Structures are given as structure tokens and as C-alpha cells.
Amino acid sequence: MMGSRKRLPLAAAAVITATLLSACEPERGVRATRDFDRKVDVACVERALNDSFPHVSRYDYVDDGYGTFTKGTQVAQFTYYRSDDRRGVSWVEVGDTKQGARLSHSFTGLGMELPQEDFPEALSKMRQANAALAAQCQLELGTAKLKEIGQDVDALND
């Protein structure tokens, strides 16, 4: 079963980006980013996540250059997991670069720190997603180290 696919207008993507960058609502969680020297088959990423998770949503937007991608990059974002309290979300983002493509994999939320007890399950889901991407799309993320964003994450030290 394919997940829902939504295309965000540029104005909506700008609002989301502005919210992420807002000083009153800092981003919290973990992220790993890896550059590939080839283009990434976005349809394969979508299939792999849909095969592994029951609720995958796709959002396409043009990046404003204040985050993971350079300004003007067309990005496909796939959300596939939400924490029980719905504050944290796991997603994969894919965008082309001059040399190939960048893939970013995150579990983040906005505002207050995410509860430490949310991370073990989220990291397990991220490993599951990484395995699906490796098996179906030959996208190995093993060299991309998860980095803490705006808070300490105890589960990274286990």
C-alpha cells in the first residue's frame, strides 16, 4: 500500500521552514546526513519506506537554504514514524546536489526537549528504515553518524 503524497506549495514550505528556524521553537532530536556521488531514486526510497511502515507521507518542497540543503533544492520528505506523544517525528529527506544527492534521516520535534524514553523506539525505527533503504535502494547510511540537535540523547550512548 502506498502512503499519501502531498505537494506543499512554496508558501507552506516557507512557513514550515520558518517554524523550524524560529528562536522560540528550537528543533530537538537527532539527525544523520550523508552525501552520495550519484542521484538517489526517490521512488525507491518511497517504496522501501512504504514496505516497512504502515503510515508514510510524502511532502515535496523547495528548500530555502537555511537547513540541510542549499537554497533552491527540490526536496522529497518522507515521514514514517511518530512518537506516542506525537511530539517527535522520524523522516527521511532526499535532495539533489551538484555532485549527486544528499540524504538526511532525522527524529526531531520542536520546542521542549523530547523525552529520553522516546529515543530507543525512534532509533529502532530509524535502524529499520536504514535497513530497508540499504536492501532495496543500495543506500548505505552506516557511515553517517547521528548527531544530537538541541539536546542530549542518552540512547546514543547505550
Image: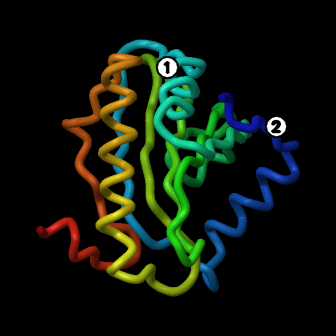
Residue at the image point whose x is 40% and y is 75% from the top: 150
Looking at the image, residue 72 lies above or below residue 157: above
Residue that mark 2 sits on: 7
First in sequence: mark 1 vs mark 2: 2
Residue that mark 1 sits on: 98
CA distance for labels 1 and 2: 24 Å
Residue at the image point whose x is 44% and y is 53% from the top: 106
Instruction: Residue 130: give its label.
Output: none
Label 2 neighbour load within 10 Å: few <14, some 14-19, many 20+: few
Determine whether, in the image, residue 105 is placed left or right of residue 78.
left
User: Which of labels 1 and 2 is toward the front?
Assistant: 2
Determine whether, in the image, residue 90 is placed left or right of residue 37.
right
Q: Quadrant of residue 10?
A: top right
Q: Quadrant of the N terminus?
A: top right
SS for dot 1: loop
Percent position of residue 43, x then y? 59, 19
Q: Amino acid at mark 2?
A: Arg
SS for dot 2: strand
Along the viewing direction, whichever of 50 and 106 lies nearer the viewer: 50
Determine whether, in the image, residue 62 is placed left or right of residue 49.
right
Residue at the image point whose x is 52% and y is 55% from the top: 81
Residue at the image point whose x is 41% and y is 13% from the top: 38
Q: Dots 1 and 2: beta carbons under 8 Å?
A: no
Q: Amino acid at mark 1?
A: Lys
